[in-house]
Image (tube, grey):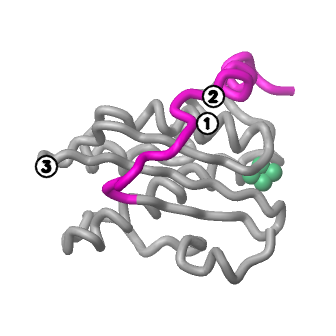
Amino acid sequence: MYSEKVMDHFQNPRNVGEIEDASGVGTVGNAKCGDIMRIFLDIDEKGIIRDVKFKTFGCGAAVATSSMATELVKGKTIREAMQVTNKAVMEALDGLPPVKVHCSLLAEEAIHAALWDYAEKNGITIEGLERPKSDIGEHEEEQEY
Ligand code: FES
């Protein structure tokens, strides 16, 4: 049911962890399955994503898509990171079963939420970036998981 790449990224996820004093942090969740994903970005003064880490409390596909998404944005510019859509992540993983497509969407949303946080902190606008719909970072304490 899963591609070898999905299994590999699920079993050996890349970039797991946190970044202290991250340039941007995005936390998103899916209300239906209850899975949560958090992405930390370290962005240098030239706007290059120097480092990225993630923490995912969720299904195997969510872990694999977060892992692949972090690999795809690492070392990239913000503009390039904006091209890392859920479709790009799925393609890089050689596909996902239809019921797992929403997991890859979570990865895209988490990156966007982290970029949004970075933009807000620095008072800049990132072209094409919209306020994250499901950023739950600020209300975390109020939610029960
Ligand atoms: Fe919801 Fe995978 S089942 S993120």
Residue located 60% across and 63% down the image = 28
Mark 2 residue element: loop
Q: Do the residues under discs 1 and 2 have CB atoms within 8 angstroms? A: no
Quadrant where the image shows the C terminus:
bottom right
Give the residue type at disc 3: Glu
Give the residue type at disc 1: Met
Q: Residue furthest front?
A: 20
Q: Could you tell me how far apart the alpha carbons at marks 2 and 3 are, in whole angstroms? A: 28 Å
Q: Which mark is residue 90?
A: 1
**First along the sequence among labels 1 and 2:** 2
Quadrant where the image shows the N terminus:
top right
Magenta-highlighted residues: 1-24
- Residue matched to label 2: 13
Q: Nearer the viewer, residue 47 or 127?
A: 47
Q: Nearer the viewer, residue 85 or 53?
A: 53
Give the x, y percent position of residue 62.
70, 44
Q: Is mark 1 within 8 Å of ligand 1?
A: no
- Residue matched to label 3: 45
